[in-house]
Amino acid sequence: MSLKNAGHDHYCFRLYLECAISAGLLGLGTHVYGFITNGALPIYESDVMAKGKFEFSALRLLIGTLTSLTCLDREQRVGLAKKVAQYCTKIINLDDQATVLQMCTLLFNAQITPDDQGSVYKDLGNMQSCLKKSMKSVTEIDDPQQMAALYVQLLDTFIYFFISYEDVVNAQQINGLLTKMKQEFSEKAIPKSSPALTHLTTIQTYISWKQKIKNNAKSALEALEAAHYIDNPLPVVNDPKDKAQVSAREKVREEVRSQLKPTAETKAKSETEKWLQITL
């Protein structure tokens, strides 16, 4: 505790998290929990949060550490996730608050030590709650440029969950956010040269790309091929100049593509319909 007594709260906080990660790599769940609850969190509550310094960087470190750990049980994971979410809502700086709340959603969908309910802790309600609170923080920001940048960041987060966890964010919610952004950007007269609008254009271009079935068909086929070749590798070509070996390899590749194509087309159709629900 000499570092803490010397006033180096942030370094002491970081050291406890590093110890937790090291213990986690060894599968020492009890020690991991101890390093966090008896070490890092008391320092955060009594020094970092009380003094109003390093809150943002400390929470980023804490969230990053917790998402990397897989040896906590369900009760430990639930308790830590909810406590960190509370910390996030207490940050005074609204732009930092909006960002860490988005990061905090990951704590409610994490791997845990297997129990009778499985090996993944997933709390949709708290994930959605973090996103709603983040949006509220963004709407309360006074600086137009900062607000615009954080709106686009939030849209990025929405797209991430739409791709990976549609039960957390659906197309209707993305449409609602896009409408809100259009209204706010117009009222605040955000210039077209703004980096936020440039980023927004990039996101819209990606959505348009995903709304075309041929693009999804190609992506789906490539993903299915990659998964297939993990267990069924293509024939090895020892000599690239050997036409027979090359031909045999390409023949197998074409046969695999032919078998996987119907499945890829079905997946592509479903994926395209999903993205077409978003209105640009």
Image (tube, grey):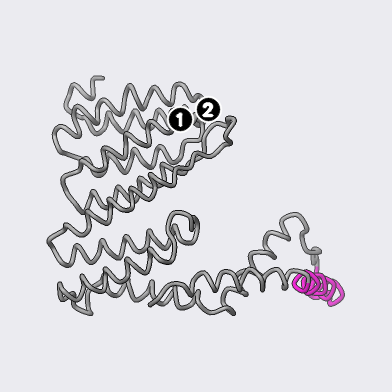
Dot 2 falls on a residue whose secondary structure is loop
Q: Which residue is drawn at 56% across and 77% down?
A: 215
Q: Position of residue 145 (x, y in %)?
A: 18, 67
Tell me the magenta residue range: 239-258
* Circles 1, 2 touching at the beta carbon (< 8 Å): yes
Q: Residue at x 23, y 55 (%)?
A: 136
Q: Residue at x 68, y 59 (%)?
A: 227
Q: Where is residue 147 in the image (x, y as percent from the top left)?
A: 20, 63
- Residue 249 lies in the magenta stretch: yes
The answer to which of 188 and 9 lies nearer the viewer is 188
Q: Give the crowd class for mark 1: few <14, some 14-19, many >=20 residues within 10 Å.
A: some
Query: What residue is shown with label 1?
Result: 22
Q: Residue at x 23, y 20 (%)?
A: 2
Q: What residue type is labelled 1?
A: Ser
The answer to which of 125 and 190 lies nearer the viewer is 125
The secondary structure that most of the magenta stretch takes on is: helix
- Visible residue check, residue 240: no
- Visible residue check, residue 128: yes
The answer to which of 127 and 254 lies nearer the viewer is 127
Query: What residue is shown with label 2?
Result: 26
Q: What residue type is labelled 2?
A: Leu
Quadrant containing the C terminus in the rendered view: bottom left
Marks 1 and 2, how far apart at CA: 7 Å
Dot 1 falls on a residue whose secondary structure is helix
Horizontal side of 151 relative to 163 (left or right) equals: left
Q: Where is residue 52 in the image (x, y as percent from the top left)?
A: 15, 38
Quadrant containing the N terminus in the rendered view: top left
11 is higher (above) or lower (below) than 101: above
Quarter of the image for residue 182 reads bottom left
Quarter of the image for residue 39 reads top left
Q: Position of residue 61 (x, y in %)?
A: 33, 40
